[in-house]
Amino acid sequence: MTLARRSFILSLLFGIWAWFAETAGLVTWAGAAGCTTYFACCGCGQDAAKGIWANLSGIFWASLSLWLAARNINPYLLMAVFTFIMCIQSHHPLLSFTSGTFVGCFCTFAAGAPSIALILSLVMGNGIGLASSYLSDLHIMHRYRLNS
């Protein structure tokens, strides 16, 4: 029943997110990517920061890659170098979720450039995942108290 409850809460939050993102000029699909990062990282509150930092580092590396490519530096060389960097940075605990780094990187490439809207969308997407976990756990605790 926990999966159904979390799924229901997540679907409600995504409906609200889709409306809010459209209204505020944010990137709806990037919010979904941020939420995916949260659940792929662990789906528990203690690792939420790890997913956000991973996404942000991916945006940074993609932005640097786009900037250097615009200055006629070989894009194949850039891809090789930045892929290595994104993997090796996982030695740092906050950057250890490599898949989240690649999500942030690919979102930047998909958006065509980094932007405040992209950054906010990815971070808020992680927040949607965290909120759905928290709200479903809160509901379980409330139900347990009523049945005790």
Image (cartoon, rainbow, N blue to C red):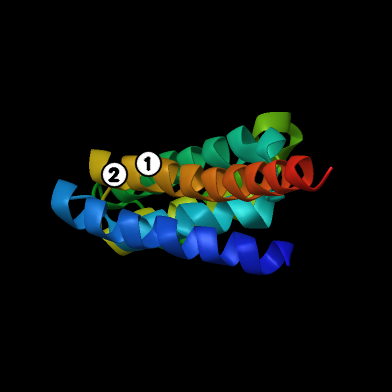
Q: Confirm or deny contact between disc 1 and disc 2 (CB under 8 A).
A: yes
The image quarter containing residue 99 is: bottom right
Q: Closer to the camera, 9 or 62?
A: 9
Q: Amino acid at mark 2?
A: Trp
Q: Closer to the camera, 102 or 125?
A: 125
Few, some or many residues within 10 Å of mark 2 (<14, 14–19, 20+): few
- 84 relative to 59 in the view: left or right: right
- 109 relative to 10 in the view: left or right: left
* Residue pictured at 60% horizontal, 33% vertical: 49
* Residue pictured at 32% horizontal, 55% vertical: 16
The image quarter containing residue 90 is: top right
Residue 120, given in percent of the width and then of the height, sits at 33, 40
Few, some or many residues within 10 Å of mark 1 (<14, 14–19, 20+): some
Q: Amino acid at mark 1?
A: Leu
| Quarter occupied by the N terminus | bottom right
- 53 relative to 3 in the view: left or right: left
* Residue pictured at 61% horizontal, 60% vertical: 6
| Quarter occupied by the C terminus | top right
- 77 relative to 43 in the view: left or right: left
Residue 68, given in percent of the width and then of the height, sits at 32, 45
Residue 117, given in percent of the width and then of the height, sits at 25, 44
Residue 20 in view here = yes
Identify the element where label 2 is drawn.
helix
- Residue under circle 2? 67
* Residue pictured at 68% horizontal, 38% vertical: 47
How many badges with numbers are in the image? 2
Q: Closer to the camera, 56 or 148?
A: 148
- Residue under circle 1? 64
Between the C-alphas of marks 1 and 2, the distance is 5 Å
Dot label at residue 14: none
Q: Residue furthest front?
A: 147
Identify the element where label 1 is drawn.
helix
